Amino acid sequence: MTRTLGNAAPDPVLEAIGRYAGADNPSAFLALNLETSRYVQPGLPGVILYRQSGRYLVQFGGPFAPDDSYDELLRRFLDHAEGQGRVPVAVQLQRADAPRYAEHGFTVNQVGASYAVDLDGFSLHGNKFMRLRNKISRALRNGLRIDEVTIADWSDELGEIDQAWLSSKGEHAAPLAFLVGQLGGPAQRHRRLFLGRIGERPVGYISYSPVFGARAGWMHDLSRRVPGGSPGVMEAINCAAIQVFRAEGAGWLHFGFTPFSGLDDRFELPGHSPGLRWFMRFLWAEGAAIYPAQTQYAYKQKWSPDVVIPEYFACPGRASVAGFAHVFRACDAF
């Protein structure tokens, strides 16, 4: 099953991520981020998305291409990188991509996982959701109101939330990019935005991006809140969005990629790097300064995901920690 968004697509990339191999990547819509570069070849259907970081070309996902041009498009991209004297690496590859990259000479390791909830019959009833229900109830008792809104009507207020959120991260903090969604730009017409207010004061928002493929639905993407204030704000906003999506017949709510989480030896490919596997586990345990994986994972587990989707990092030849570090440089993490 694929999902397309019709002739209103702001870019041919949107058609590629909805139709071709790669559409099952729940984060595929991030391909529409404004700073992402696109590699295409005339006469060869499909697109490869990447960002340059130093001497590395950091690819997002596998080729979004029909199966019969997937490998040829990847081969030409690798030739393109070599011709520029740059090293191609790839992140957020899906399980179907991983062996194909291995065939092209990459070492492929699991780098984390994404999580999804089946909305068919989803309910917060039961003991396992008691704490979550209590947090949501507390936020609502504190006067939280939740509405689906547009950026045009709330741009100043959203900017104030962003600034307050960023200021809480420290003096040198910057918003992550590349593997995180955006607000605004031509692709905004396809996103959904839910805003929480207490009184007339906006206190948090969550942006949702469309998800294509076999588990079509929405992805809980960019989310920010004013520090402090009422507990349960983000949980209540997400619960309200779930109610809307279920009423519309959406199948799945995805929670996106969490680096270093969900690591499992069963997901590794033959020929993976044991050293990089150890490093991923080390970053899960000790890498909060690089990425707050455990905090993100804990939030996602509150919703009792039905599916854990392994995601992969690929490096040409032997695995390289330096190559992996450039994934985070491409995201402006440091």
Image: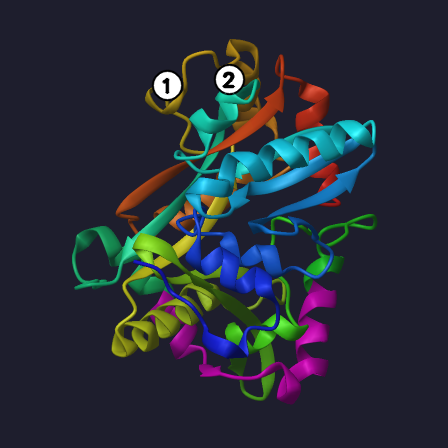
Nearest to N terminus: mark 2 or mark 1? 1
Against 30, residue 247 (above or below) is below
Q: Which residues are magenta?
A: 136-164
Which quarter of the image is occupied by the C terminus? top right
Q: Residue at image x 38%, y 70%?
A: 138
Identify the element where label 1 is drawn: helix
Please provide percent x and percent y for residue 29: 53, 59
Please provide percent x and percent y for residue 17: 49, 56
Which residue is nearer to you in this view: 276 or 107?
107
Q: Which mark is residue 224?
A: none
In the displayed structure image, the side of residue 120 where residue 34 appears, left or right: right
In the displayed structure image, the side of residue 33 where residue 273 appears, left or right: left
Please provide percent x and percent y for residue 41: 66, 48
**Is the Cβ of the residue at disc 2 closer than 8 Å to that at disc 1?**
yes
User: Distance of mark 2 from mark 1, alpha carbons?
Assistant: 9 Å
Q: Amino acid at mark 1?
A: Asp
Residue, disc 2: 277
- The answer to whether residue 231 is seen in the rendering is no
Q: Amino acid at mark 2?
A: Arg
- The answer to whether residue 249 is seen in the rendering is yes
Identify the element where label 2 is drawn: helix
Residue, disc 1: 265
Q: Main secondary structure of the magenta part?
A: helix
Please provide percent x and percent y for residue 247: 26, 78
Q: Residue at image x 29%, y 64%?
A: 133
